[in-house]
Amino acid sequence: MSEVDGASAEDGFERRPGEEWTALPTEFDAGLYFIGRISTPWTRRSECPKNGRQTNAVCTVRVDPAFVPALQNVEGASHLILLYWMDRAARNLVRQRPRHADGSRGTFSLRSPARPNPVALSVVELIRRDGDTLVVQGLDCLDGTPLLDIKPYYASTDSRPEATVERSGR
């Protein structure tokens, strides 16, 4: 199996008809810090739910010691936004062919982990905090995924019930 920027066909990133790959820049524009790791029951992309609302699995988010003080008062939120780095995803796929679609779609019109910067987000329910660990429900990532950030979810500002997405194959 050949590798494509860290993702192999074994991981489910084989090229499908209608997909397009691009060359990535040789240098990065920014740096970031992983603040912890996520533990889930899934070790292969094919096992992961399509999104966090499709599973009741209880997962854990372990925050690195340097960032544990930042968890102060996090228990005041019933739900959190987790931003994480899909480190095993292809990064040079600009047109994708989702399994459920008739044709290809631009990467920026999809929630796929395959993207130039594989940043993902989930709104999770916070079940409890145990020291440096958050026990949550609502994730859709592989076991060991690096954590980028944690933010409280505010239904009053984060929810957009009027939002729509056209599901044509264009």
Image (cartoon, rainbow, N blue to C red):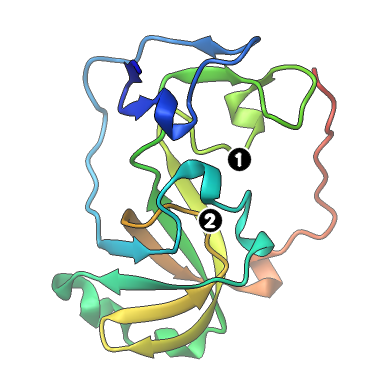
Q: Residues within 10 Å of mark 2 (few under 14, many from 20)?
A: many
Locate residue 156: give its quadrant: bottom right
Instruction: Relative to 123, say whether 3 is above or below.
Output: above
Q: Which mark is residue 111?
A: 1
Please provide percent x and percent y for residue 86: 40, 44
Please provide percent x and percent y for residue 114: 48, 31
Q: Residues within 10 Å of mark 1 (few under 14, many from 20)?
A: few
Please provide percent x and percent y for residue 8: 37, 25
Left or right: residue 49 compared with residue 21? right
Q: Residue at x 49, y 76 (%)?
A: 136
Q: Which mark is residue 31?
A: none
Q: Residue at x 21, y 72 (%)?
A: 67
Q: Residue at x 14, y 72 (%)?
A: 66
Locate residue 97: give its quadrant: top right
Q: Which amino acid type is marked by label 1?
A: Arg
Q: Residue at x 66, y 67 (%)?
A: 157
Residue that protrudes farthest toward the left in the picture: 66
Check disc 2 and report the residue beneath it.
Answer: 140
Instruction: Relative to 47, say whether 65 is above or below.
Output: below
Left or right: residue 167 compared with residue 64? right
Which one is in front, 86 or 100? Answer: 100
Which quadrant of the figure contains the N terminus?
top left
Residue 90 visible: no
Left or right: residue 79 compared with residue 27? right
Element type where label 2 sits in the image = loop
Residue 2 visible: yes
Which quadrant of the figure contains the C terminus?
top right
Element type where label 1 sits in the image = loop
Which one is in front, 71 or 12? Answer: 12
Q: Which amino acid type is marked by label 2?
A: Asp
Locate residue 89: give its quadrant: top left
